[in-house]
Image (tube, rainbow, N blue to C red):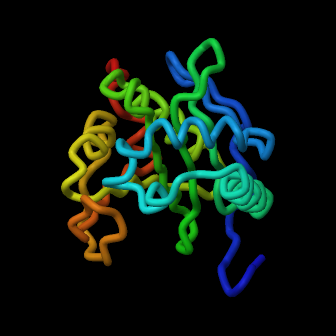
Amino acid sequence: MTLGGVDLWLEEAPPEELEAGRIGLRRWRIADAELLVRLVADNMEHLRPWMPWAEARPTVESQRAFLSRAQQAWVERTGFGYAVTLPDGEPIGGMGLHTHESAGTMEIGYWIAATQVRQGYATEGSARLTGAALALAGVVRVEIRCDEANQASAAVPRKLGYKLVGTVDKEPHAAAETGRDLIWAVRGEDWRSRPRRLI
């Protein structure tokens, strides 16, 4: 199936809710718009260096539009956006799993609230999403990409045993970006045979 000239190759979606160590991942809902406004607004200075979408103050309308696009991407099986939550249900960030135009590869993205960083939550969530992606029919590889200056983000795939497979130049879109992305990747066979060490 194709949409707008893009091959929609993924035949199934990951679960809408996932347990990931000390956190949970649940599908974003349009009803989360006000919650997401507060979460993003509280983290603008933290997010702005790396997230182009953090330049403008969030509004209910802007976040509802974002969540509507996320719902459509889920239906089309091109992107799967999750709220990152603590055991009491408090949201502390967002994670996503996205398809590539090249069949067989998915990419993980993540951000965690400033008050919750350096506690391993992005690593735990990414480990769970890696496993969920590789459990889908046709997925053989998962990538994590980040600007080479974003060492906190790069620490996640490094801890999980991803391999640095390349770099790519691109136009910088956020304040701290250098315009050079690191590409980290893991293949299904390597993920399944990795040592079961603590993350």
Can you give x and y, in whole percent of width and height, for residue 3 in the image?
Answer: 74, 80
Indicate left or right for 138 with 107 as reference: right
Outermost residue to the bottom? 5
Q: Is residue 74 visible?
A: no
Nearest to the observer: residue 188 or residue 25: 25
Q: Does 151 sit left or right of 63 as displayed?
A: left
- Determine the image quadrant of residue 31: top right
Where in the figure is residue 107, as x and y percent of width and height? 48, 56
Residue at (76, 64) in percent of width and height: 76
Mark yes or no: residue 41 visible: yes
Q: Give the vertical position of 66 relative to 16 (above or below).
A: below
In the image, farthest residue toward the top = 88
**Among the 4 quarters of the image, the one containing residue 171:** bottom left
Quarter of the rendering occupied by the C terminus: top left
Quadrant that contains the N terminus:
bottom right
Which residue: 68% across, 87% down?
A: 5
Closest to the observer, 42 or 100: 42
Residue 119: x and y in percent read: 35, 21
Above or below, 169 relative to 138: below
Above or below residue 187? Residue 85 is: above
Residue at image point 34% right, 63% down: 174
Residue drawn at x 21%, y 66% is 178
Pinpoint residue 103: horizontal percent, then vertical percent. 57, 69
> Where on the picture, by quarter, is residue 164?
bottom left
Horizontal arrangement in the rendering, residue 179 relative to residue 130 (left or right) = left
Q: Position of 29 compared to 149: left or right? A: right
